[in-house]
């Protein structure tokens, strides 16, 4: 980092206020020449840019004032709380004219962003979720806390809120990444939830205090959700869903993408099913399967699953053949059974003895053998 | 085929009565040396085999008598009704000690097996199905009839019966492949359905008339379901499900395998979800997706799906930028908007004019611009 830390911080803060978040021209320029250089040029108007005039007029005081009042802090690369994962955005190619690393992030809440995001799963999906989707998201988020996998989402109604609430129900920190300033989190209907999130977790945004959410900002925000997390799970989304954008960003950042299936009759299943069908996402049905995908090999791997044992499981092949040679009703002699099963008589008799001990066959008074 | 057709037919009929279906030793032996040679050796006891004694005692008359009475016919390779797909079983390696081509098939019903199976989908799943699974199977089977994709299943309770019934509801032929003789189809609770199936479709079995279903015969039967079909769809199955075996056989025969997802809270979703997760099966959510998988490229391909158009979709980037630069409440001057959006004033004014025509912005009396 060139210049003093304070100069760097001021340049990044100014960029986050003046340049629309995720403008790939400017994020790329900052990646090449540094935030201080870019800010100086924008401010001076010495390089052609659509942001020159806005930079020339920029006054940080109103933003800092709003930040102060709402206890919002601004963190930049190099700060202890800056999450390593965001660097992956510098290498990812833009999606629909959004891309690059944030200049900084505006944080609000008691959590530590680097700590929470180190072992975290993005759980995202549609606002218009079904009761099934809500239950899946809340259940998954709660179960992930057993192994301290933190949940990151977008704070929206529907799947996002269910995921945050599942984590909150376990008194776990969770992170809501917003498309507006963290001083007035959107939607206001989730205000109580946002306050609970701030107790141990965080509201996070590229947008400075005072900024409202817009459609491009939601798209830009999705890349931050993806990059902050170890992996992403899509729970529900109709044909056209914002979770598609988070899914794409997970791919660009090299994060494993997962999706939870649901009813084929629900339009909300469209996006997860399409992602699975197109092999963009791995199907996950529970937290254990999510942990297997995001976890390090070893500790987080699933045990091999077996069904309950059944009576015939422990029989050897000859015993099974004899058992299956018995008629549904009535009995057969050992000789008949040995012929039907294609086994020598001694083998057949030995098998019958084992089956009798196992309670699978009985011998009638006249020496014939029956099922049960 | 060596010898007369009648001798070949008699040899295959005898083998189908004496040798347990799908015994890979004998099916392999028949593939190498021919049915007549194998039957002659078993009958004479000239080669060591577990089936020698049973072969020596074999009398075809009781079986032929049962077949006559139930109007069951026996078809063999070379017959017009013999389905080509079964040849793939000759090359597939055995699964759990079952494998190889059937010596012949016992058929009952008005359908033509070669015709029905030429364009067919196996729809299989658990007996203990959920109402959701039943609905999926019936719906899928009925919809497949729109393009005359025939349904093959196992005639069991649950998913199998729902699939047959979905096809029957469209007056379409369907095939039930049984693990018992077709003269007394199992389970008897589906008797009415079996009679409906026989009107245009078929009951099919490797088992001669009079034989009861056993566990190994169900496993052996599953390879016939897979080989008869163009592709297979698993609808529901708990952790340990017979549909797993059909799935494995579909793979061995080079048939595409599909699975329908469902609730992650239902144990019946385990097998389809596991098959999808392990990339053994492609996720399918409706008949169109099944047709896309089993159909020839071209006719059966899906159109690209798009969501409904939204107001902002038709705007150019500058118009979107100006739109997004408007505050949630109150207005801004064109000059302010041009600075916030980073656009030249003429570009901004031109964008505002377009937005106004589209009804997305309004101009107040004092010359400021507002949303809506």
Image (cartoon, coloured by chain):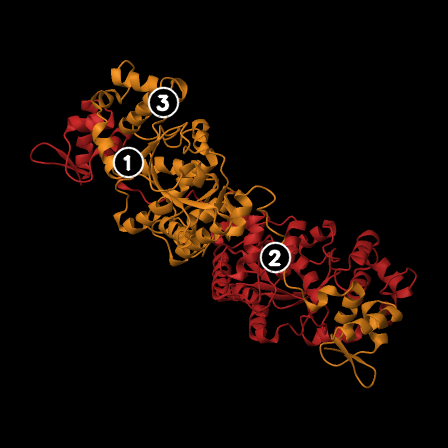
Chain colours: A orange, B red
Label 2 sits on residue: B117
Q: From the top left corner, tell me how far across and down residue A285 is, in percent.
A: 51, 53
Q: From the top left corner, tell me how far across and down residue B192 is, in percent.
A: 56, 75
Q: Considering only vertical position in the picture, is B18 above or below B291? A: below
Q: Considering only vertical position in the picture, is A276 above or below A369? A: above
Label 3 sits on residue: A5
| Chain at tag 3 | A
Q: Which residue appears farthest toward the bottom when viewing the image?
A: A365
Q: Which residue appears farthest toward the right when viewing the image?
A: B46
Secondary structure beneath label 2? helix
Secondary structure beneath label 3? helix
Specify the quadrant that holds the C terminus of chain A.
bottom right
Residue B295 visible, this orientation: no
- Label 2 crowd (10 A; few <14 / some 14-19 / many >=20): many
Q: Which residue appears farthest toward the top when viewing the image?
A: A46
Residue A351 visible, this orientation: yes
- Report if the CB atoms under discs 2 and 1 are less than 8 Å apart: no
- Label 1 crowd (10 A; few <14 / some 14-19 / many >=20): few
- Marks 1 and 3 belong to one chain: no
Q: Is residue A228 left or right of residue A369?
A: left
Q: From the top left corner, tell me how far across and down residue B143 is, in percent.
A: 47, 58
Label 1 sits on residue: B314
Q: Is residue A73 left or right of residue B2?
A: left
Q: From the top left corner, tell me how far across and down residue B237 is, in percent.
A: 57, 60
Q: Nearer the viewer, mark 1 or mark 3?
A: 3
């Amino acid at each position: 980092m060139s210049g003093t830390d304070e100069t760097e911080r001021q340049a990044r803060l100014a960029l986050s206020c003046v340049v629309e978040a995720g403008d790939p021209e400017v994020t790329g320029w900052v990646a090449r020449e540094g935030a201080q250089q870019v800010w100086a040029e924008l401010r001076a108007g010495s390089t052609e840019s659509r942001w020159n005039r806005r930079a020339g007029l920029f006054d940080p005081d109103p933003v800092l004032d709003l930040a102060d009042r709402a206890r919002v802090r601004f963190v930049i690369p190099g700060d202890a709380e800056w999450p390593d994962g965001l660097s992956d955005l510098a290498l990812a190619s833009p999606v629909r004219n959004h891309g690059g690393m944030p200049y900084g992030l505006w944080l609000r809440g008691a959590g530590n962003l680097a700590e929470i995001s180190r072992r975290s799963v993005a759980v995202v999906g549609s606002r218009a979720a079904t009761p099934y989707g809500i239950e899946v998201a809340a259940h998954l988020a709660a179960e992930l806390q057993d192994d301290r996998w933190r949940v990151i989402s977008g704070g929206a109604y529907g799947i996002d809120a269910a995921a945050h609430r599942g984590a909150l129900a376990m008194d776990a920190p969770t992170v809501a990444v917003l498309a507006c300033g963290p001083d007035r989190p959107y939607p206001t209907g989730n205000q109580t939830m946002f306050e609970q999130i701030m107790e141990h977790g965080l509201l996070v945004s590229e947008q400075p205090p005072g900024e409202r959410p817009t459609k491009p900002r939601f798209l830009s925000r999705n890349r931050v959700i993806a990059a902050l997390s170890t992996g992403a799970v899509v729970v529900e989304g109709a044909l056209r869903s914002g979770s598609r954008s988070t899914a794409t960003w997970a791919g660009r950042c090299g994060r494993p993408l997962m999706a939870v299936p649901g009813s084929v009759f629900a339009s909300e299943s469209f996006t997860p099913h399409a992602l699975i069908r197109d092999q963009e996402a791995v199907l996950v049905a529970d937290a254990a399967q999510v942990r297997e995908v995001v976890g390090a090999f070893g500790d987080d791997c699933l045990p091999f699953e077996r069904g309950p044992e059944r009576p015939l499981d422990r029989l050897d092949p000859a015993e099974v053949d004899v058992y299956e040679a018995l008629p549904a009703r009535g009995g057969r002699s050992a000789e008949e059974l040995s012929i039907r099963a294609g086994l020598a008589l001694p083998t057949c008799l030995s098998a019958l003895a084992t089956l009798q001990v196992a309670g699978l066959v009985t011998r009638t008074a006249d020496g014939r053998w029956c099922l049960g």
